[in-house]
């Protein structure tokens, strides 16, 4: 079997006394779409932030395409090929929608004209091309989520980390977003790790699901197996349901 | 950016350029000296704007770079006979070095926002104290350049008539505008705006924020020190108490704040508005025979208050729209990087 694109080995992070993530290990094959689910406070975003270089793990190792990446700065992680979105969207509010995405594209396409062309294509893919000249501050939340994804895609990542990009979207909007990710995955082989509460999207997209609870991985596997797993049902619905 | 400017704006710009070019023939020495002052603050405001308006790093100590630039060039001229153009190179290098030290200390150790601003004040203040006691440079008694009456303008040594100084300052201000226009169209220009808007998001897009902020400080400090060189040869005297004064730093930033932070024409408009109105008020007071010391400062304060309250983006974005120089929405042809939906 080929080496996985991303390999997380026994990573842990504590904030003061609080164990946010303890000894979590998993791997993602290139070209797969994998979901990370779990109740609020389970440590999903902390795990993301360790992969994205915002926090250095206290222990363990993160390997991306065979290289150790833990402890690198977020910009170095991005250059290595990991793009990310933020759960609380962070558009460059004063800049136009297009310029937001151009800034992402400039990493791989230093020439402005080329970056603008690429950014335009990505905006079309996400369906917000007609808003390219508006200030990002004027966008609605669903459009901001799309912009967040567009900007991350513009960095041309091999692995895309999506932090709750479906939250706040209507079901039809969710389906459109799901379709975009499917297309990208099919056409370019983009590998995706998503944190998501919207099960409609999780079930439609992911080939594999990891469940995090109290900072520990309690289940991993194919979607239909995981949603029947008693431990998973218990952490989501309480003991009686399981 | 200039290619996108609509015909009306281009016409206005051409008219302004023409007016500035022929000004020495139609204006008396007093008007010319006011014009030099306006251009001086347009230039320094532009330089400060690179750091704050583009990259979002607030400096309240830009008089530091003016002072270092002025003293470097003056010292080389007086003590070693090196002309101001050669001296300018040293001045720029010295200011950039100091800027690099401040930037490194701040950005390496994650000092941002208000604390960064305080650091810039601190550096300007203790440099002032140092120069106050530096006998080789005249200490607190002042450092003077020799003044000789000349028949011809000596551009090489910056000795000559107010008209010559006017054109030198006009050239500097024009060059700064062109340079900043170009900067905003480069990759680093985009990266600065990203850092100004949201540093963490910028970093997630692969931007080395430390390096970009350092470059902003280096460019800004280097540009500002050229104004210092001009100042030294224009006024022929330097006093640490004056040139490093925090009030001077504030004067530098008033123009861009009132004109519009982050815009290309804001610093120019702001400098012009402040100088013309402040002089107008002083003149008016003199006419009606009231003498009020400090009226200029009160006036600056009121301007700042009014602009902050009613035009938080500055006068320029609003004016550009009113004059029809901007066709909103869309990429702003006036070069405004702050684009808010409500103007």
Image: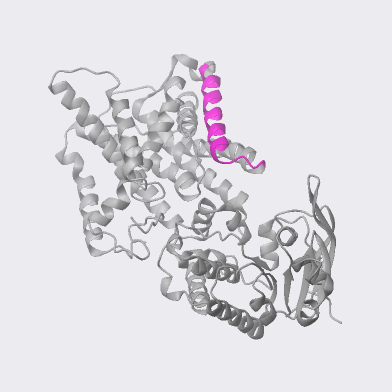
The quarter of the picture where residue B44 lies is top left
Q: Which residues are magenta?
A: B109-132
Residue A203: percent from left, percent from top: 69, 80
Please state the horizontal and vertical placement of residue A13, each as a whole percent of the image: 80, 53
- Residue that appears at 50% across and 65% down: A141
Q: Is residue A105 above or below residue B282?
A: below
Residue drawn at the location 47% of the way across and 44% of the way down: B52
Residue extending farthest to the front is A240
Q: In terms of image quadrants, where is residue A22? A: bottom right
Name which residue lies at 50% across and 27% down.
Answer: B80
For this orientation, the residue located farthest to the top is B141
**Would residue B178 appear left or right of A12 to someone viewing this image?**
left
> Depth check: B302 or A81 in front?
B302
Colour scheme of the rendered structure = one colour
Image quarter of residue A130: bottom left
Magenta stretch contains residue A128: no
Tell me residue A63's x, y (percent): 81, 66
As for residue B119 lying within the magenta part, the answer is yes
Report the front residue among B329 and B296.
B329
Identified at 42% across, 22% down, the residue is: B242
Tell me if residue B143 can be seen: yes
Asked if residue A140 lies left or right of residue A240, the reply is: left
């Amino acid at each position: 079997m080929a080496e996985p694109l991303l390999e997380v080995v026994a990573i842990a992070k504590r904030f003061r006394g609080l164990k946010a993530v303890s000894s979590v290990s998993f791997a993602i094959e290139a070209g797969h779409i994998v979901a990370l689910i779990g109740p609020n406070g389970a440590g999903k975003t902390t795990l993301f932030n360790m992969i994205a270089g915002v926090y250095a793990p206290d222990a363990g190792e993160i390997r991306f395409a065979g290289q150790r990446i833990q402890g690198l700065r977020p910009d170095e992680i991005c250059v290595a090929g990991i793009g990310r979105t933020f759960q609380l969207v962070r558009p460059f509010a004063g800049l136009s929608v297009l310029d937001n995405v151009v800034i992402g594209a400039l990493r791989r396409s230093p020439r402005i004209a080329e970056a603008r062309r690429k950014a335009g294509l990505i905006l079309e893919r996400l369906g917000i091309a007609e808003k390219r000249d508006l200030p990002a501050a004027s966008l609605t939340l669903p459009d901001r989520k799309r912009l967040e994804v567009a900007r991350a895609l513009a960095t041309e990542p091999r692995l895309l980390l999506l932090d709750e990009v479906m939250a706040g979207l209507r079901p039809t909007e969710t389906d459109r977003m799901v379709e975009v990710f499917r297309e990208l995955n099919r056409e370019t082989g983009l590998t995706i790790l998503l944190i998501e509460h919207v099960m409609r999207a999780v079930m439609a997209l992911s080939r594999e699901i990891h469940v995090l609870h109290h900072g520990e991985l309690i289940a991993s596997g194919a979607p239909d197996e995981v949603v029947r797993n008693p431990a998973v049902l218990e952490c989501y619905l309480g003991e009686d349901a399981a | 950016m200039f290619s996108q400017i609509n015909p009306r704006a281009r016409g206005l710009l051409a008219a302004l350029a023409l007016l500035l070019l022929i000004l020495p023939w139609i204006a008396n020495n007093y008007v010319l000296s006011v014009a030099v002052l306006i251009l001086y603050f347009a230039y320094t405001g532009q330089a400060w704007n690179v750091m704050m308006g583009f990259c979002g790093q607030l400096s309240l100590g830009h008089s530091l770079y003016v002072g270092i630039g002025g003293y470097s060039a003056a010292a080389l001229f007086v003590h070693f006979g090196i002309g101001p153009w050669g001296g300018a190179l040293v001045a720029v290098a010295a200011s950039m070095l100091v800027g690099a030290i401040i930037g490194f200390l701040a950005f390496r150790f994650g000092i941002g926002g208000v604390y960064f601003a305080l650091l810039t004040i601190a550096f300007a203040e203790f440099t002032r104290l140092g120069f106050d006691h530096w006998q080789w440079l005249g200490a607190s008694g002042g450092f003077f350049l020799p003044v000789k009456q000349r028949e011809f303008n000596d551009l090489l040594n910056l000795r000559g008539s107010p008209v010559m100084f006017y054109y030198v300052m006009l050239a500097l201000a024009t060059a700064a505008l062109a340079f900043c226009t170009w900067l905003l169209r480069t990759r680093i220009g985009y990266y600065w705006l990203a850092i100004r808007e949201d540093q963490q998001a910028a970093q997630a897009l692969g931007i080395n924020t430390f390096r970009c902020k350092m470059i902003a400080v280096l460019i800004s400090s280097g540009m500002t020190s050229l104004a210092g060189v001009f100042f030294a040869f224009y006024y022929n005297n330097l006093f640490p108490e004056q040139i490093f004064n925090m009030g001077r730093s504030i004067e530098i930033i008033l123009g861009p704040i009132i004109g519009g932070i982050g815009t290309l024409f804001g610093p120019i408009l702001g400098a012009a508005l402040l100088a013309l109105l402040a002089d107008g008020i002083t003149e008016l007071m003199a006419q009606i025979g009231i003498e009020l010391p400090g009226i200029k400062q009160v006036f600056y304060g009121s301007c700042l208050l009014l602009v902050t309250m009613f035009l938080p983006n500055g006068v320029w974005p609003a004016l550009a729209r009113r004059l029809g120089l901007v066709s909103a929405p869309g990429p702003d042809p006036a070069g405004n990087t702050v684009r808010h939906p409500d103007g």
